[in-house]
Amino acid sequence: MSVYTNRESLLAALTPRRKSKKIGFVPTMGALHQGHLTLVNKALEENDCVVISIFVNPTQFNNTEDLEKYPRDLETDVALLKSLGKNIIIYAPEASDLYGDSITATDYNFQGLEHEMEGKHREGHFNGVGTILNIFFRIIEPDNAYFGEKDFQQLQIVKKLVEIENLPLNIVGVPIVREKSGLALSSRNKRLTETYKKEAVLISKMLKEVKERFASHSISELNRFVKETFDKNDQLALEYFEIANEKTLKTAIKKSKNEKYRAFIAVFAGEIRLIDNMALN
Ligand code: PAF
C-alpha cells in the first residue's frame, strides 16, 4: 500500500499499471468507516488495484463551519486501509494539487437532478461535487468508480456527470451500510454525542415505517406521519422528508403504477446534519 500526496507521484505509480490492470476508484473525504471499507472491498473484488482519494473538498460545502469541523484523521484512515491489502493506493492531496490557484466550482447543468432535495438546501453543493470528481476522474482514469447509496442523489448526479463529460468509466452504486440500530454509517456520526446517536435511530426507523405503510397509505398521509413524529421529538429537527421518483428525483405527490419510489430525509441532530434514504417499492 502506498500513500501519494501529489499527482506526479501518483501518476508515476499508476501509469505502468494502466496497460494491463483494471483500476478501481473510491473517492472519499476521509474519516473512514465501515461504509467506505465496503466500497473499497467491492472495488478490490472487481479491479486489480484501487485508488482511494482522501480529500475534504472545499467547493462542495456551503457552510464554512461544516467544512472546518468536518472530521479529519489521515493517520487512522491510512491504518484502516492498510488492513485491506496491498493493491491499494491512497491519494491524499492538498487543494492546490487538484485545483491549482483557483478553488472554484464549474457551473453544471445536471438536467434538474441538482435542484431537488439536497440541492434546495445546500446551494452549489453538486457543482462542487461534480467539479472535484471530474478532476479526479481525469487524473486517475479509473475503469470503475464506487459510490454509496446513502448519498443517492449524489450517485445519480455522478452518473449524469460521466454522461455530460463523456468519460469512459463505469459508476457502481453500493447499498447503504447501517449500524445494528439502523443508523446509516456516516463520517458525521463521529461528531454525534451518545444522546444524539441514540435519538438519531428515529431517522431509519421512520424510513422503515414509511416503507411498510407505502402500499396502504397515500403520499400525503406518509408525509404528515413523518412530520408529526419529528415535531414530537425535541432533540431532532426535520429539515426535509420527501418521497421522490427514484429516476428523476422529483417529489412525488401521487403514486403511479410502474414507477419506483424512494424516501429521502435530512435531519439535524443538534448542529450535525444527517441524511438517509430507502427504496419503497
Ligand atoms: O461523498 C463524498 O464523500 C464526497 O461527496 C466525494 C464523492 C468524495 C466528493 O468530494
Image (cartoon, rainbow, N blue to C red):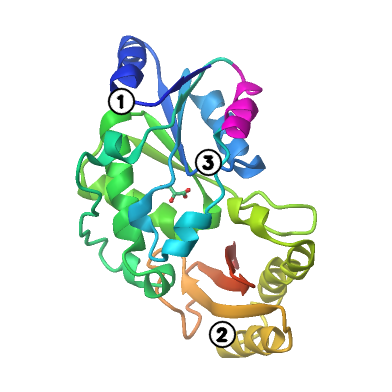
In the figure, 21 relative to 31: above or below? above
Q: Which residue is mark 3?
A: 30
Residue 157 visible, this angle:
no
Q: What is the three-letter code of the residue carrying label 1?
A: Arg
Q: What is the number of the mark on residue 219?
A: 2
Residue 61 image offset from top left, x and y in percent? 40, 60
Judging depth in this view, the residue of 32 and 262 nearest the camera is 32
In this view of the protein, which residue sits in the foreground, 37 or 168?
37
Q: Residues within 10 Å of mark 3 (few under 14, many from 20)?
A: many
Q: From which residue to which does the magenta span run? A: 75-85
Front label number (3 vs 2): 3
Say which amino acid is labelled 2.
Ile
Which structural element holds mark 3? loop
- Figure quadrant of the C terminus: bottom right
Mark 2 vs mark 1: give the one in front. 1
Q: Main secondary structure of the magenta part?
A: helix
Q: Earlier in the sequence, mark 3 or mark 1?
A: 1
- Percent x, y of residue 144: 40, 32
- The reply to whether the residue tagged 1 has its Cβ within 8 angstroms of ligand 1 is no
Pointer 1 residue: 7
Secondary structure at numbered mark 2: helix
Could you say which quadrant of the image residue 9 lies in? top left
Q: Residue at x 59, y 70 (%)?
A: 271
Q: Quote the CA–CA distance across marks 2 and 1.
A: 49 Å
Question: Which of marks 1 and 2 precedes in the sequence?
Answer: 1
In 3D space, how far apart are the residues under numbered discs 3 and 2 (Cα atoms)? 37 Å
Residue 33 forms part of the magenta stretch: no
Residue 20 makes an appearance in the image: yes
